[in-house]
Image (cartoon, rainbow, N blue to C red):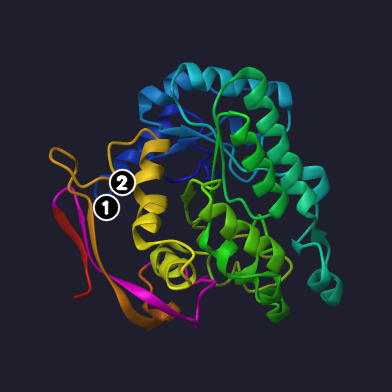
Amino acid sequence: MCMPNTNPTADCPKVIEYILSKAKSTGINVYPAAAITKALKSEELNDFEALRSAGAAALSDDGRPVINSLLMAKAMQKANELNMPVLSHCEDLFLSEGGKMNEGKVSEKLNVKGVPAAAEDCGTAREIALSAAYDVPVHICHVSTKTSVALIRDAKRRGVKVTAETDPHYFSLTEDELLKRDADYRMSPPLRTEDDRIAVIKGIKDGTIDAIATDHAPHTPKEKSDFLSSPNGSVGMETSLAAGITYLVNENYITLNRLIELMSCTPARLLNINAGTISEGAPADLVLFSTDEKWIVDINKLHGKSKNALFKGKELSGKVKLTICGGKIVFTNM
């Protein structure tokens, strides 16, 4: 699922239709998320019905969360009427303004302004409160803090219609990676503490976190060349399955079947997509992979144009050997 923070912003049917037309030649399924507000400015809601008719599969303002709570409440209610998922990047932009990494021991050591965990926690709390107040669903993206995990766990126990996802880097890496002063390890939300990492794993284990995504964010080497001025984000699609096997399955936190559920079946269900299962009549979207094969992540052997991979140089277990989409082989590494 591609996010709407493009140029131009995916906030009108014309852009959604363009994305889908370009996707036809890729051999894979691309599901566009359309912007909640015009130009991601948190000022005016887009025409959700028109966006859905054009092919938008979900709604999100991605890394620029909707600041206006009343506007977000209206968006969640309207999206619910249309059965469109709302995907929320939870962040209080006032708390996080100017921050480059997690606020803590590493930011202090490097003398760099940090992003407090409270920025994410306040955003998570607001979305949960809106979901509970208006009895409408909301999906929380890339959970990275122990408090956000606790807030979501409590909300689910109370019957709030909240679901959540995390990304491989939040259950495998910590803020210590930033000591390298390498911008490839800067993303939003930032890598957090070891306590946060363990809390995310516990959230995966007990079902608080429903899915594992990637927050795949490609940038050019030039864009990522300066540690402080570089844009946030890293690439993670090619390493996501292996990271899950390496840091979750091999560490006996979850089973392989549970990992597949987190990365395939549940995301498809949450997004109302006809995919994620092997059954008669279902799309033949299949992946053949080895669980035991070990490999070193070499940025020069990745298939995307961008090389800002945060697992670079690390040994991972699990290798994709064959990908089939719609019954056609689209990738092979046999």
- Number of the label disc, if any, that sits on residue 23: 2
Marks 2 and 1: CB-CB under 8 Å? yes
59 horizontally vs 274: left or right: right
Secondary structure at numbered mark 1: loop
Q: Residue at x 83, y 63 (%)?
A: 113
Q: Residues within 10 Å of mark 1 (few under 14, many from 20)?
A: few
- Whether residue 171 is situated above or below residue 44 in the rendered picture: below
Q: Position of residue 269 (x, y in %)?
A: 37, 37
Q: Position of residue 156 (x, y in %)?
A: 59, 35
Write down the quadrant of residue 70 in the picture. top right
Disc 1 marks a residue whose amino acid type is Thr
Q: Residues within 10 Å of mark 2 (few under 14, many from 20)?
A: some
Can residue 72 be seen in the rendering of this structure?
no
Q: Which residues are magenta?
A: 304-327
**C-alpha gap between disc 2 and disc 1:** 5 Å
Asked whether 103 or 49 is in front, the reply is 103
Q: Residue at x 47, y 53 (%)?
A: 213
Secondary structure at numbered mark 2: helix
- Whether residue 212 is situated above or below residue 153 in the rendered picture: below
- Number of the label disc, if any, that sits on residue 26: 1
- Residue 307 covered by magenta stretch: yes
